[in-house]
């Protein structure tokens, strides 16, 4: 029996299922699902720790990770309870954090960022399946992935400035890389919505489809990635990730080195 989520077996056991995050693994494909649809998958420090743990728990067999959200929204962003005096149970409120030592505040934000960083690992390809709202932290989580397939009802928005904050969960770098500085600044400063047509036109999304076709489109993309030779995809991803920081000549050198490794491996001369 095949799941509508990723094409994986419905019998796949959950490797992790807590704090609004569920990780399931079926051989080469893992699925990370945000499961608190009642709150439109609003995010919290507990959810961020669970996301970071999901990255640490990935078996070595995994080649592709699909990120999705249950319900009508991918993720409506940060749970506003973080800004109340009481905060979350067992957690310091953001207001209390701000009153503490600067070094502790920096370390806490760095811990939160870990939930958004592992998606760029060169040994996996990550795909966000995004429907409905992807706001603030939700937008940044979608940006953390390598690829984004969106439903035609998607609404991206970076609303941090309306709260007197900045996007601090790793989203600024990929946003600028995808759409350029001027458009990224305008999106962040105004907090406006970016819909499916603009997302595909500007490179925020690889593909936009009707909502009913989102799961099938993601399955097709995952199958195409898995069909390619794993080591070739890993080397290619690393080349592309480093391209912006290299000169043209340096990039050609990196290509030669990577191709040399691939040819030696194919000839049975690898390490």
Image (cartoon, rainbow, N blue to C red):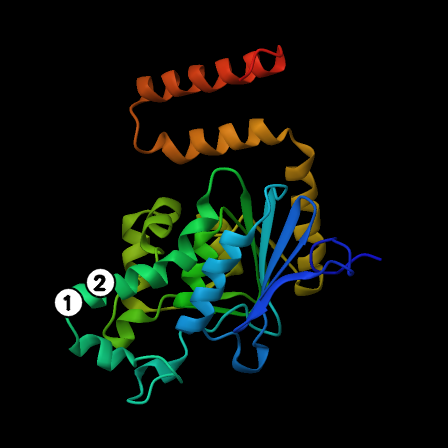
Q: Is residue 237 left or right of residue 174?
A: right
Compute the Cα span from label 1 to label 2. Answer: 6 Å
Q: Is residue 29 above or below residue 107?
A: above
Q: Residue at x 54, y 73 (%)?
A: 20
Q: Residue furthest right?
A: 1
Residue 77 seen in this snapshot: no
Q: Residue 199: horizontal and vertical position, in percent? A: 48, 55
Q: Is residue 78 above or below residue 113?
A: below
Residue 72 seen in this snapshot: yes
Q: Residue at x 57, y 11 (%)?
A: 269
Q: Is residue 196 left or right of residue 92?
A: right
**Foreground of the two, 208 or 124:** 124
Q: Residue at x 53, y 59 (%)?
A: 196
Q: Is residue 269 left or right of residue 118?
A: right
Q: Look at the numbered disc 2 and give the secondary structure of its residue.
A: helix
Q: Which mark is residue 106?
A: 2
Q: Residue 7: horizontal and vertical position, in percent? A: 74, 53
Count the labels in the image: 2
**Foreground of the two, 156 or 49:** 49
Q: Which quadrant of the structure image shows residue 109? A: bottom left
Characterize the local packing of mark 1: few (<14), some (14-19) or many (20 or more) Cα atoms within 10 angstroms: few
Q: Which mark is residue 28?
A: none
Characterize the local packing of mark 2: few (<14), some (14-19) or many (20 or more) Cα atoms within 10 angstroms: few
**Foreground of the two, 170 or 206:** 170
Q: Which mark is residue 102?
A: 1
Quadrant in the picture for the N terminus: bottom right
Q: Residue 15: horizontal and vertical position, in percent? A: 63, 60
Q: Residue at x 22, y 68 (%)?
A: 105
Q: Are marks 1 and 2 in contact (CB under 8 Å)?
A: yes
Q: Which quadrant of the structure image shows residue 226? A: top right
Q: Look at the numbered disc 1 and give the secondary structure of its residue.
A: helix
């Amino acid at each position: 029996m095949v799941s509508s989520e990723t094409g994986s077996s419905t019998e796949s056991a959950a490797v992790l299922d807590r704090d609004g995050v569920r990780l399931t693994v079926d051989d080469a494909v893992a699925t990370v699902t945000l499961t608190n649809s009642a709150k439109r998958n609003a995010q919290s420090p507990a959810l961020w720790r669970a996301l970071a743990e999901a990255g640490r728990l990935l078996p070595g067999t995994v080649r592709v990770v699909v990120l999705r959200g249950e319900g009508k929204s991918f993720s409506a962003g940060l749970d506003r309870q973080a800004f109340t005096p009481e905060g979350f149970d067992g957690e310091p409120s953001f207001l209390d954090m701000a009153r503490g030592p600067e070094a502790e505040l920096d370390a806490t934000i760095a811990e939160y960022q870990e939930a958004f960083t592992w998606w760029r690992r060169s040994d996996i390809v990550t795909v966000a399946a995004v429907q409905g709202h992807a706001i603030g932290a939700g937008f940044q989580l979608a940006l953390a992935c390598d690829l984004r397939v969106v439903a035609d009802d998607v609404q991206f928005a970076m609303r941090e400035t309306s709260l007197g904050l900045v996007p601090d969960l790793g989203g600024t770098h990929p946003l600028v890389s995808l759409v350029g500085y001027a458009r990224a600044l305008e999106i962040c400063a105004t907090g406006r919505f970016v819909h499916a047509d603009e997302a595909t036109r500007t490179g925020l999304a690889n593909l936009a489809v009707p909502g009913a076709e989102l799961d099938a489109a993601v399955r097709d993309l995952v199958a195409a990635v898995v069909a390619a030779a794993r080591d070739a995809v890993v080397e290619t991803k690393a080349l592309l990730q480093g391209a912006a920081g290299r000169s043209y000549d340096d990039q050609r050198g990196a290509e030669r080195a990577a191709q040399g490794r691939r040819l030696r491996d194919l000839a049975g001369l690898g390490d």
